[in-house]
């Protein structure tokens, strides 16, 4: 490991009080807006209501030739501090009539800059740096919800990613420059302090070759500029030592743009204290920005976009049909594809089915988002629970406009039938659970079908809402969802009454900092599913707060830190980094409180290497051991031992689910459990050969542990119930199909029983 210097005063970054805040940027935006050569638009609004600005610098009127747009949008990670200063410096230089170098580099280009694409993350990071100046700033890694934005450009679940998507989809830039900063490799395990493409192999096969060639040219231009300024940089034209690849991690901006034929350049600069000065961090980016502008300005013909630059296919299509449990899944996925500019056609021969023709410019994006290859972990079809069929038939050319994809509307005759029905059937899906929780809040009786007896409408897992208010209730519910069915359960149906559940969500050390992505997922899941929940801390647990709740949910994370507090020896907390406070975990008292809560009849749901491992190794409320963990990420195939069990109800005998850990970021996850004693395997992992992963050699290495290993376990403890799961049911707010694992588990441990 390279030696990290810790002494120079400027070897990290400016004090928090000197960094550009959101308010500072807003003042600058007002000043730029008054200049004739600039205009500012609002690209979107963040989760906490802050404007996301787009600064547009257009060439002077009368300039020859059509102007190519180039987009700069570094800063999706709010804790990478130097992007805002660098992009503000770029704007200031381009607006300065005396800066000949910047004016010459820009040429006749239209420059688009999003100086702060994640304002909520920036605000949170600066707030943390005010108290702990040398902390990594993990409070601002993601947005206000805790989601990492640079993993969301496929699913577009967050307002910030939708704002950035809107910009590159509308402007279709000649190139996107997405600067980043690194705290794990550059200047730490490598001597170099900055990196520019080419990307390391392998490349995603759906990426256009022209886009990759353009990235290589821009990377070479950056390397020349950095060499001129004397930076110690990593640049490998042989593509063997690149810091990043164009393959693997789904949802990144460079892949989302690349599938559209837009070359997207990522640069990295070291930000670990002592690796390089703050001024160098900023200057590296500005020099890279100007180098890219100069390269594109000098060779506009190489970067000019054509409508058919991407690999349009001459034949074939993808058919989307609903899965077994969620009839709205195809509509939801079709709407997302349409948002990406994919041409989506309703299938007139099949109900709620859609056809995606491949003879359109978005064919590479379609293959990336819907492909089922073993290495394609980005496929959204299993996440939504949608069936796909790839057809080789030749179809007419896709229309130039996409029909508007709407939620289904309810027919008048169906509404009349609903108004006279005693029961209304709702499928066990994410929106169905939300509807059930809304009904429970309004005092509407709800039954859960564990074993069906009757019509095809009433399948195991279906919810039945008693129509106590006749036409008014039917109309209100139908208007909200547009998809209900009258039901008449027969004798022999196994119906379980549901009630409102008071949920506590653990939100403290061990599930925060770099593990905050796990907390964000369960927070999103509980909100989306309509549960009432309150976040609780370790101190509150120790003081007995759980007495006010029915169920405790502990997200994924690091069980050791949940118990003992932050590990000061972990890379992200030890010098030269600063721990953002005093380590504080549950301790013996907190663990004893949770054990007593469950023993007296409370419910416990544990996720991953946080709550799951905690139940086994520290709380000892589950007779199981952790066989292994840290198998990175991918899509596992699970087999339900008893599909009628409440926890797996509605998912079928075999289903896919996402598992996740990121060892390079010290993010724990993906444990494999071995049940023993009274613990019961509800679902096990099938052979790794059936999984989808970018790391099959690692899976093969761990095959003995993985095949048949415990994925979802349950056990009674005293009068309470425990459920743990190795997979992430609400992964990145995208896996709508497995979100019901969380609601099923909550209702199971809340002791749903026969009246």
Image: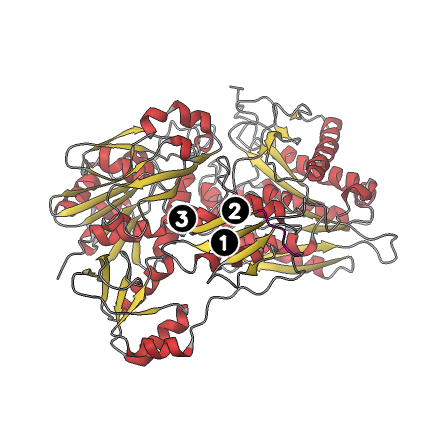
Residue 506 in the image, given as x and y percentages of width and height: 30, 47
Q: Nearer the viewer, mark 2 or mark 1?
A: 1
Q: Alpha-carbon neighbours of circle 1 within 10 Å: few (<14), some, or many (≥20)?
A: many
Say above or below: 8 vs 619: above
Marks 2/1: CA–CA distance: 9 Å
Q: Which residues are magenta?
A: 392-396
Q: Residue at x 66, y 31 (%)?
A: 196
Q: Nearer the viewer, residue 237 or 412?
A: 412
Residue 53 in the image, given as x and y percentages of width and height: 62, 56
What is the quadrant of residue 411 in the picture? Answer: bottom left
Report the colour scheme: secondary structure
Q: Nearer the viewer, mark 2 or mark 3?
A: 2
**Contact flag, marks 3 and 1 (Cβ < 8 Å):** no
Marks 2/3: CA–CA distance: 25 Å
Q: Which residue is mark 3?
A: 520
Q: Which residue is mark 1?
A: 320
What is the quadrant of residue 452 in the picture? Answer: bottom left
Mark 3 vs 1, N-terminal side: 1
Instruction: Identify the disc placed on residue 733.
Output: none
Q: Which quadrant is home to the C terminus?
A: bottom left
Q: Alpha-carbon neighbours of circle 3 within 10 Å: few (<14), some, or many (≥20)?
A: many
Marks 3/1: CA–CA distance: 29 Å
Say above or below: 205 vs 537: above
Q: Residue at x 88, y 57 (%)?
A: 62
Q: Which residue is mark 2?
A: 370
Residue 711 in the image, given as x and y percentages of width and height: 30, 38
> Which residue is most to the front?
393
Mainly helix, strand or loop, the magenta region? loop
Residue 728 in the image, given as x and y percentages of width and height: 37, 43
What is the quadrant of residue 715 in the picture? Answer: top left
Say above or below: 345 vs 576: below
């Amino acid at each position: 490991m390279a030696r990290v210097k810790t002494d120079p005063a400027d070897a990290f970054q400016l004090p928090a009080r000197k960094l550009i805040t959101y308010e500072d940027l807003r003042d600058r935006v007002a000043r730029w807006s008054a200049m004739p050569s600039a205009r500012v638009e609002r690209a979107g609004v963040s989760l906490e209501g802050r404007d996301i600005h787009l600064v547009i610098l257009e060439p002077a009127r009368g300039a020859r030739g059509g102007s190519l747009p180039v987009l700069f949008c570094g800063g999706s990670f709010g804790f990478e501090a130097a992007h805002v200063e660098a992009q503000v410096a770029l704007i200031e230089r381009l607006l300065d009539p005396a800066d000949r170098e910047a004016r010459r580099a820009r040429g006749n280009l239209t420059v688009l800059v999003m100086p702060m694409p994640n304002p909520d993350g920036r605000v949170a990071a600066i707030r943390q740096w005010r108290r702990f100046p040398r902390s990594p700033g993990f409070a601002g890694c993601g947005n206000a919800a805790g989601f990492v934005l640079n993993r969301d450009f496929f699913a577009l679940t967050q307002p910030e990613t939708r704002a950035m998507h809107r910009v590159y989809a509308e402007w279709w830039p000649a190139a996107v420059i997405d600067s980043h900063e690194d705290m794990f490799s550059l200047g730490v395990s490598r001597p170099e302090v900055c990196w520019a493409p080419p990307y390391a192999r392998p490349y995603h096969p759906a990426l256009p070759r022209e886009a990759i060639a353009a990235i290589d040219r821009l990377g070479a231009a950056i390397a020349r500029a950095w060499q001129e300024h004397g930076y110690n940089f990593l640049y490998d034209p042989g593509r063997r030592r690149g810091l990043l690849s164009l393959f693997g991690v789904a949802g990144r901006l460079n892949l989302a743009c690349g599938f559209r034929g837009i070359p997207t350049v990522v640069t990295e600069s070291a930000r670990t204290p002592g690796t390089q000065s703050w001024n160098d961090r900023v200057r590296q980016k500005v020099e890279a920005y100007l180098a890219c502008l100069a390269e594109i300005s000098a060779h506009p013909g190489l970067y000019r976009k054509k409508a058919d630059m991407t690999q349009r296919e001459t034949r074939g299509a993808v058919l989307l049909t609903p899965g077994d449990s969620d009839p709205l899944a195809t509509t939801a996925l079709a709407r997302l594809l349409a948002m990406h500019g994919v041409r989506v056609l309703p299938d007139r021969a099949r109900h709620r089915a859609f056809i995606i023709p491949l003879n359109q410019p978005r064919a590479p994006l379609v293959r990336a988002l819907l492909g089922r290859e073993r290495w394609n972990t980005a496929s959204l079809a299993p996440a939504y629970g949608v069936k796909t069929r790839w057809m080789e038939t030749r179809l007419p050319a896709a229309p130039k406009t996409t029909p508007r994809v709407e939620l289904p509307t309810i027919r008048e005759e169906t509404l009349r039938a609903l108004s006279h029905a005693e029961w209304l059937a709702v499928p066990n899906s994410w929106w169905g659970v939300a509807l059930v929780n809304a009904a429970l809040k309004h005092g509407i009786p709800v039954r859960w079908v564990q074993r069906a007896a009757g019509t095809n409408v009433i399948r195991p897992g279906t919810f039945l809402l008693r129509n106590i208010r006749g036409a008014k209730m039917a109309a209100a519910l139908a208007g909200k969802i547009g998809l209900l069915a009258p039901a008449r359960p027969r004798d022999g149906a196994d119906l379980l009454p549901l009630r409102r559940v008071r949920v506590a969500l653990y939100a403290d050390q061990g599930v925060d900092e770099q593990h905050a992505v796990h907390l964000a997922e369960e927070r999103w899941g509980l909100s989306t599913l309509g549960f009432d929940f309150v976040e609780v801390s370790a101190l509150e647990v120790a003081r007995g707060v759980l007495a006010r709740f029915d169920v405790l949910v502990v997200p994924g994370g690091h069980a050791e830190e949940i118990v003992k507090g932050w590990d000061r020896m972990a890379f992200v907390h030890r010098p030269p980094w600063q721990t953002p406070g005093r380590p504080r975990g549950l301790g013996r008292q907190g663990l004893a409180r949770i054990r007593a809560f469950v023993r007296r009849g409370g419910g416990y749901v544990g996720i991953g290497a946080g709550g799951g491992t905690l139940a086994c190794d520290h709380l000892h409320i589950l007779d199981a051991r952790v066989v292994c963990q840290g198998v990175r990420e991918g899509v596992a195939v699970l087999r339900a031992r008893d599909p009628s069990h409440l926890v797996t109800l509605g998912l079928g005998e075999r289903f896919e689910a996402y598992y996740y850990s990121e060892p390079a970021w010290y993010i724990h996850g993906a444990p494999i459990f071995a049940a023993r004693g009274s613990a019961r395997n509800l679902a096990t992992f099938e052979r790794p050969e059936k999984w989808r992963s970018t790391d099959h050699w690692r899976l093969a290495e761990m095959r003995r542990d993985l095949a048949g290993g415990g994925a979802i376990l349950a056990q009674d403890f005293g009068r309470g119930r425990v459920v743990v799961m190795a997979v992430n049911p609400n992964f990145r707010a995208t896996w709508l199909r497995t979100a019901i694992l969380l609601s099923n588990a909550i209702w199971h441990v809340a002791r749903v029983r026969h009246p």
